[in-house]
Structures are given as structure tokens and as C-alpha cells.
């Protein structure tokens, strides 16, 4: 497979996953805002922190009003991680490899793109409805991909991008809530505190599965344990890491005897660290510090995957001329 094709497939799915996560975050915050004082930034500014774009947001919107947060995350041209820009980037990557992806995949991504670009009636809908439509459109793209794309390297790189982005966003939204929004001792267990944790679960699409899996009160330790360590919930960090390891083994093919390379070591050690730990130990050692280390590991994983598979560094010369191929 050409490295440029692998790169496009990887980023198509990272961008669509990013757009879906942002739409989910904003949709839940819209609902949560109904329970907060008018004009309150309580459910809004943490989304900027979760996106990692606080400096850019502060420079563009010094007032930081709720409407400006929504504008920044959903439509702002100056924000490369806005929903509109993510879909734009995903479509551009798809356009470059139309011969590799299926017609249904291209049509769905193209439909999302033009809906966001040209349908003014779409933007006149209530915010929660349009965000729900964006989320469902992204989920439909996942379904079409899984239903129509052969389980070859194309699908594996698509899956890899989706899983890395999902793990990153789950850790970010949890870290923001746990580290930045912990209430004062008097508010712990209060109505607003419980609403925030319920909102966090809904942001990750985890509320119903949490209720089914954990027959206990919604409190910080239980929520953090579910989102980080649950082995079967598809948006938990542990689940994503297991599938990342599985996907990398398929991409790497038959293992070469000898010491594992840096990518194999990092993916294996990261998975082991988050498979054989307990939430009590993570909290005792500092949950924010543990999540910060995990985010650094995910960034390193991305860098190693990009270096090995997604850049034109591995070039083999043939009689037909140079071709960029996967190692």
C-alpha cells in the first residue's frame, strides 16, 4: 500500500471521529446549560480545554461567551479542529484516494461536507438537532466503512486512526472534568456534581452502558474506572488500546525474530499499563498525572506510526520508477 493512501485513510477517520466527538460534547453541553444559570460558562469553557485549543480561542474570543464557544467548536474557519474544518479535511483526503475507498463511503462523506457548506436551512435548526444530525452522519460513515470496505490494510489504517482519536478524546474530556471541574468539598455528591458526571458519560456515549455495567451511584471513581479501564465498552481507553495493539500486529504482519522495535514496545507497554491497574491506584497516584502520561504515550504512538507507515521516507526503487510503499 502506498504510504500516502495509508496516511489519507488514517486521517479521514481521525477527522470524522474528531468531528463526531465534538458534536457529542457540544450537544451534551447544550442540554446541560438548561440546568445552569443563564449566561453561565460552566458547561462550555471546559470543552475548549478538552480540545486543546484554549490559547487560540482566547485570542479569537476574549469574552468567551457560550455562543462563541459553540461557534469556535462548530463553524469557526480559524479553528482547524472545528467540526466544519474536520469534515473538510476528511473529504479532501478522501478525494485524493477515491479509487481506494468505496463509492458509498465517498458519497456519505461528500454529503456531510455539502450539508455543512451550503444548506443554510440546516444551520437554522435548533442547535441540539443539527449537532445530533452531524453525530449521526459521522456514525453512518463508520457503519458504511465497516460494511463495505474489505478487511485489508485499508480498513486497518482506517480503524487505527479512529481508535487513536477516540482514546485521546476520552482521556481529554475525563481529565478536564476530573482535574479542572472537581467541586468544592461542600458540592461533592450534590445535584450539580452528579449532573456533570452524567453529562460526562453522555459525552462519551457511555451513560446507558455504565448503568448496565455498574450497579452503583454515579460518582467520580466509578465513572473514571469505566471510561478508562472497562475491557468491553468500545469508547473506553483500555478497549481502544487493545484494538490498537491488535491492528498494529496485523499491519506489521509476521513478526521478525529478535527484539521488538520501538513502536511495538510502546504499544505493548501502554496496553499492559492500562490493563493491569486499578482505578484506586490511579487516583492514589494522581489521576491527572496518569492521564497526562497516557496522552503523551498516545502522541508518541501517533508519531511512530506516522514515521513508519505514513510518510514517504520508505521508498523502494523499481524499474518503473520510484514508488512510496509501506515498510
Image (cartoon, rainbow, N blue to C red):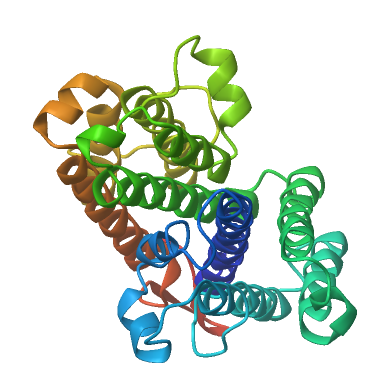
- Residue 183 image point, x, y percent: 28, 42
Q: Quadrant of the N terminus?
A: bottom right
Task: Identify which residue is drawn at 68% across, 43% down.
Answer: 151
Task: Decide: is 179 above or below 45.
Answer: above
Task: Decide: is 119 above or below 10.
Answer: below
- Residue 193 image point, x, y percent: 40, 37
Residue 261 visible in the displayed image? no
Q: Image quadrant of residue 287?
A: top left
Left or right of 104: which side holds 37?
Answer: left
Residue 67 visible in the displayed image? yes
- Residue 133 image point, x, y percent: 79, 59
- Taking depth in this image into account, of 50 and 314 the one nearest to the observer is 50
Farthest residue to the top: give it: 215
Task: Decide: is 236 above or below 55.
Answer: above
Farthest residue to the left: give it: 285
Task: Identify which residue is drawn at 52% across, 79% down.
Answer: 68
- Taking depth in this image into account, of 205 and 256 the one nearest to the observer is 205
- Taking depth in this image into account, of 9 and 84 the one nearest to the observer is 84
Task: Identify which residue is drawn at 30% across, 33% down.
Answer: 271
Q: Quadrant of the C terminus?
A: bottom left
Task: Identify which residue is drawn at 79% across, 77% down.
Answer: 123
Amino acid at each position: 500500500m502506498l504510504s500516502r493512501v495509508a496516511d489519507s485513510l488514517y486521517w479521514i477517520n481521525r477527522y470524522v471521529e474528531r468531528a463526531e466527538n465534538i458534536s457529542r460534547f457540544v450537544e451534551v453541553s447544550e442540554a446541560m446549560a438548561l440546568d445552569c444559570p443563564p449566561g453561565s460558562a460552566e458547561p462550555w469553557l471546559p470543552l475548549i480545554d478538552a480540545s486543546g485549543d484554549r490559547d487560540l480561542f482566547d485570542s479569537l474570543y476574549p469574552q468567551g461567551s457560550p455562543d462563541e464557544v459553540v461557534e469556535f467548536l462548530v463553524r469557526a474557519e480559524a479553528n482547524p479542529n472545528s467540526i466544519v474544518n474536520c469534515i473538510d479535511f476528511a473529504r479532501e483526503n478522501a478525494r485524493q484516494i477515491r479509487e481506494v475507498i468505496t463509492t458509498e463511503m465517498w458519497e456519505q462523506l461528500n454529503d456531510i461536507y455539502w450539508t455543512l457548506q451550503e444548506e443554510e436551512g440546516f444551520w437554522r435548526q435548533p442547535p441540539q438537532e443539527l449537532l445530533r444530525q452531524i453525530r449521526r452522519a459521522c456514525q453512518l460513515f463508520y457503519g458504511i466503512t465497516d460494511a463495505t470496505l474489505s478487511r485489508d490494510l485499508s480498513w486497518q489504517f482506517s480503524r487505527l486512526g479512529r481508535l487513536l482519536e477516540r482514546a485521546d478524546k476520552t482521556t481529554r474530556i475525563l481529565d478536564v472534568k476530573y482535574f479542572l471541574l472537581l467541586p468544592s468539598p461542600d458540592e461533592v455528591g450534590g445535584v450539580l456534581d452528579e449532573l456533570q458526571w452524567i453529562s460526562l458519560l453522555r459525552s462519551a456515549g457511555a451513560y446507558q452502558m455504565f448503568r448496565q455495567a455498574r450497579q452503583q451511584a454515579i460518582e467520580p471513581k466509578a465513572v473514571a474506572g469505566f471510561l478508562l479501564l472497562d475491557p468491553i465498552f468500545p469508547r473506553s481507553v483500555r478497549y481502544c488500546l487493545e484494538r490498537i495493539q491488535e491492528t498494529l500486529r496485523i499491519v506489521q504482519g509476521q513478526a521478525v525474530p529478535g527484539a521488538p522495535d520501538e513502536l511495538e514496545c510502546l504499544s505493548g507497554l501502554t496496553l499492559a499499563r492500562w490493563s493491569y491497574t486499578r482505578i484506586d491506584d490511579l487516583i492514589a497516584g494522581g489521576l491527572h498525572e496518569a492521564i497526562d502520561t497516557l496522552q503523551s504515550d498516545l502522541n508518541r504512538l501517533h508519531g511512530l506510526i506516522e514515521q513508519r507507515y505514513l510518510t514517504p521516507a520508505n521508498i523502494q526503487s523499481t524499474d518503473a520508477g520510484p514508488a512510496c510503499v509501506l515498510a
